[in-house]
Amino acid sequence: GAPPPPPGPGVPPPPGVPGAPPLPGGARGPSNLKTKKKYKLDVQMRRMNWNRIQALQVASGSFWASANEDAFASHDFFSDLEKTFGTGRARNIEMDANPRFKPPKIKELKVLDAKSAQNISILLGTLRMDYQAVKKLVLTVNDEKLTEPLLQQFLKFMPNREEMQQLSAFKDKMSDLGDAEQFAVVMGDVRRLNERLECMLFRARFPEEVGELQPSISAVTSACREIKTSRKFGKLLELILLMGNYMNSGSRNQQSYGFELSYLTKLSSTKSADQKTTLLHFLASTTENRFPDVLDFANELRNVEEASKSSEEMMAKGIKQMEGGIQKMKTELKQHAKPQSRDDKFAERMKEFLGTAEDRFHKLQDQYMLMEKKYDELANYFCFDRKKTTMEEFFGDLTSFCKDFERAKKENAKLREQLEKQKLQKEREERVRQAKLKRPTVKSNPKVIDLSKGGDDEEGVLDNLLECLQSGSVFNPRGKKRGGAKAPMQTQRSRSHVSASPDQPEVSPSLPNHTGPTLAPVAKKPPKPSYTSSSRPPASYSSRSSNGPSQAQELLARLQDRPSGTML
């Protein structure tokens, strides 16, 4: 028959077909698929639980068909696996086509202790260089690789002189030493190693140390000059002295010629008699109201706060260390006048640096001496003990006083604002109270409202009517004359009926023999005007009055018609 069809892409042909992989036992995928190495382990290892791809599954041209993991195999690599994932002692590893090997033994330390050896191993891990290359870095004074932190580790972890001498006896037996001790033996070949490293560290630190000292020295020098020459600060001290001598009258502190400036920080501890303010707030208020030219005295003390951050002890220590570093470098240059080897560049590099460093140091030292002189003058000027009062304390007290004074000014302003608001509030309350006193409780002649208008204003009419009842004016209208003069309300009401009949009967006069309160005569209601449905009612009639008298009108009429002393 016909040959079987070719397999699809990536699918191996079934076993027995030409080109198909052999069956398990020497099972292979593609024809060029190599047999993987088999390793023999003495103890159990942690397992990697992956899903295995069998040889039959490896397609020709796939990644796994060309994978070559053997390129990464090494004894060190397998030793690391042993140490990390082995569950027992170190063991031999056997690889097909390679001889059996043993991982290197951990060699016993001869001179160094375990901690020192570990620290040196950490240092070597940071460098990642062989021992001879590290030695060359030191000889050539390589600034780029041997940075300040690395030099510090060298000086910290390298064996001392005695240990180095002991290790030098193993130069011919380097294989018996561990990595850390081998490195120490190689570095021991560098002449005066520790002194070299110290000079290199000083050289690396010098620009930073100058950069830290110079601003502090400059700030203190400027602050001393500002305090001594400030006119406003001097006037403020005079004002405080005046206040103190006045308040201390009769005490042991009276008639003082001055005071220690540290007292400035205690002004806020003196309270007023009513405990509502302090001496500091009083000083700020007095200065603002009476001596405003002194108020901004802190603007003349601009460098005081920066000077308060400077440590006199640290500045003196820095100058001393810098001077000692330069002297040590001069000594080492004499010791290394002749290079140790062709790679030894110590003398050449350090001479270049020393010329510049000495010049900068002498300038900085002069500035430091000037600062000390200015502070001594300041101590004499304000009569305080230079030895008992450090720079940090003196400038710190002045900085605190300046900040407290500014805070007191703000609190005074806030208090004035609150008092002003309270004053305005009291004035408003007083105006309201005076207005209430001037306003009469009962109107002597309440306004007469036209009752004929009615409409939506009837609620106001009833209020007015109630006021009339309370005042009694409805029974005895003021302004009524004998002889039958009309009351104001009636007159207004009569005038409101502009459409009344001309032959309206006259109002009957009041009865002379009536013993009760005189009532206002009531006019008869005029006849209702007639108009057609198409014509508009007169303007004097509202929509409510056209349907009859309002409740207010009826009530008023009943009040006026009733006999005196009767109830409704």
Image (cartoon, rainbow, N blue to C red):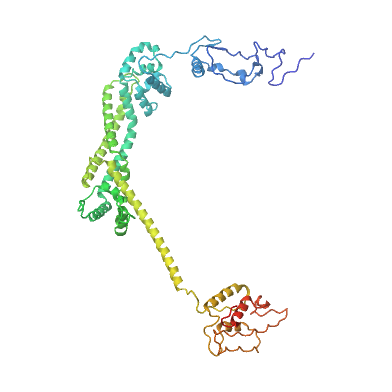
Quadrant including the N terminus? top right
Quadrant of the snapshot with the C terminus:
bottom right
The quarter of the displayed image where residue 544 is located: bottom right
State the image coordinates of residue 206 (x, y, percent, origin top left): 32, 32
* Residue drawn where x is 32% and y is 23% of the image: 194
Name the spot of residue 317 as percent of width and height, x first: 28, 34
Q: Nearer the viewer, residue 77 or 493?
A: 493
Above or below, 405 against 359 in this view is below
| Front residue of this view, candidates 103 and 562 | 562
The part of the image, by quadrant, that contains residue 422 is: bottom left
Left or right for 151, reference 232: right
50 in relation to 424, above or below: above
Instruction: Judge whether 461 appears above or below 88 on screen.
Output: below
- Say if 266 sits above or below 427 in the image: above
Residue 44 locus on image (x, y percent): 54, 15
Residue at position x 32%, y 15% in the image? 166
Q: Residue furthest right?
A: 1
Q: Name the side, left or right, on which 26 lies relative to 77.
A: right
Q: Is residue 296 visible?
A: no
Residue 413 x, y percent position in the rendering: 37, 56
Q: Residue 379, can we see it?
A: yes
